[in-house]
Amino acid sequence: MATGADVAGQIDEIARRWTDDRAERQARRHLERADFDELREAGLLTLPVPTDRGGCWVSNEASARALFGVYRRLAGADASVALVSSMHPAVIGYWLMSGGGGDWADQRHAVFAGALAGEQWATITSEPGSGGDISRTVATATPDDDHGFLPGRSYGVSGLKHFGSGSGIADRMITTAIPDGEDAPALFVLDASDRRWDGSSGFELVAEWDGVAMKATQSHGMRLERAPAVRAAWDGPLDELTRAASPLIATIFTSVVLGVLDAALAEARPRIAARADSLRPYEQVEWTRAERDHWLAVQAWEGAVRAVEQADLPVAIHAALRAKQSIADLAEDTMRRLTRVLGGGTLSARAPFAHWFEDVRALGFLRPPWAFADDILFATSFDVES
């Protein structure tokens, strides 16, 4: 059985090879299935699966840092692939971080077994006007015949969704909807494998992803019409489930953007060092501040990782979101300073820096996005000691 260290070693080798093709990768506007096949073969999908189910996850304390580190390093080679891949442990985190018995335990085991079998997970929860709050859904879910792809009650989900990152790559995608006859939203798993996007199988493509950041994530907008889904077997409020997973999810996304920032500093350093003697005072200050801000971002990430490792949920939620928002600011500032020192050539599509600048800006809009994240930060500010 491969360990987390074994998988990390293979992913590091893949990242080194992909770095050599960075220019071509940054120009892409689509995902290549071969990349995800390679990551699957390396064991990446097994990282969030508990060891007693055949995977690599031991505990928060033993496994979280290694998981975050893998996505941090992979992002430096290909930010789009890293972000889509990171959805897999983020989504499985709902089942990983919440134990229990009965139907929930059966479903957890099936989720883990599917990941071991190579099923790629992703998410398509956001809706126009929701502000990124997945509980503010207006999508509906109607009981349906047994779909059979996962234990649990089968439904057909209908509604408009956007930012379905990994569309066309993911086999399973989570979403939220309000079940018939109920008032509160629930979590659902969509069977997204090999679906036509013409509406005939429940998925209709309404907006192909055209973002200037994370350009190749295929974060398409979809209209769901009785899309085949299975309801999460969690028998408590949705908020309990999302809170338990939120530190893991926020820190995974933060790790991806920090990995992009790591790569940018590593690329800029020799270029700036080569003309250090001729730098103007302004350029010297901007480089110094860029280096300092990157250091602060790393310290913030370390703080979030340690909080997740300690598994104190209120502390971890606050620390992970505080790090995410801080790094979102620091990353933009760092990239801005680097481009000022390196000059106008960084605006070229042939240079990596313009791509990286837009990629790091994406962090503030990832779950939870700016306004919603700040709401949570304020709400938790007085629950924990700084």
Image (spheres, rainbow, N blue to C red):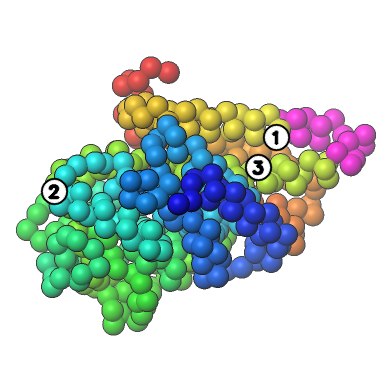
Give the distance between the C-alpha atoms of the residues marked 3 and 2, in whole angstroms.
44 Å
Element on which disc 1 rests: helix
Q: Position of residue 358 (x, y in %)?
A: 60, 52
Residue depicted at x 66% and y 59%: 18
- Name the chief secondary structure element in magenta: helix
Which of the marked residues, 2 or 1, is nearer the chain's N terminus? 2
Residue depicted at x 69% and y 46%: 264
Residue matched to label 2: 102
Location of residue 69 with respect to 157 vertically, above or below:
above
Q: Nearer the viewer, residue 313 or 183?
A: 313
Disc 3 crowd rating (10 Å Cα; few below 14, some 14-19, many 20+) is many
Residue matched to label 1: 290
Q: Nearer the viewer, residue 220 or 83?
A: 83
Badge 2 amino acid:
Gly
Image depth: mark 3 or mark 1 in front = 3
Badge 1 amino acid:
Ala
Quarter of the rendering occupied by the C terminus: top left
Which of the marked residues, 3 or 1, is nearer the chain's N terminus? 3
Location of residue 144 with respect to 305 vertically, above or below:
below
Residue at far left of view = 181
Element on which disc 3 rests: helix
Find out whether residue 259 is within the magenta segment. no
State the extent of the magenta-drawn residues as a range: 273-290
Q: Position of residue 93 (x, y in %)?
A: 35, 46
Disc 1 crowd rating (10 Å Cα; few below 14, some 14-19, many 20+) is many
Find out whether residue 289 is within the magenta segment. yes
Q: Position of residue 92 (x, y in %)?
A: 35, 51
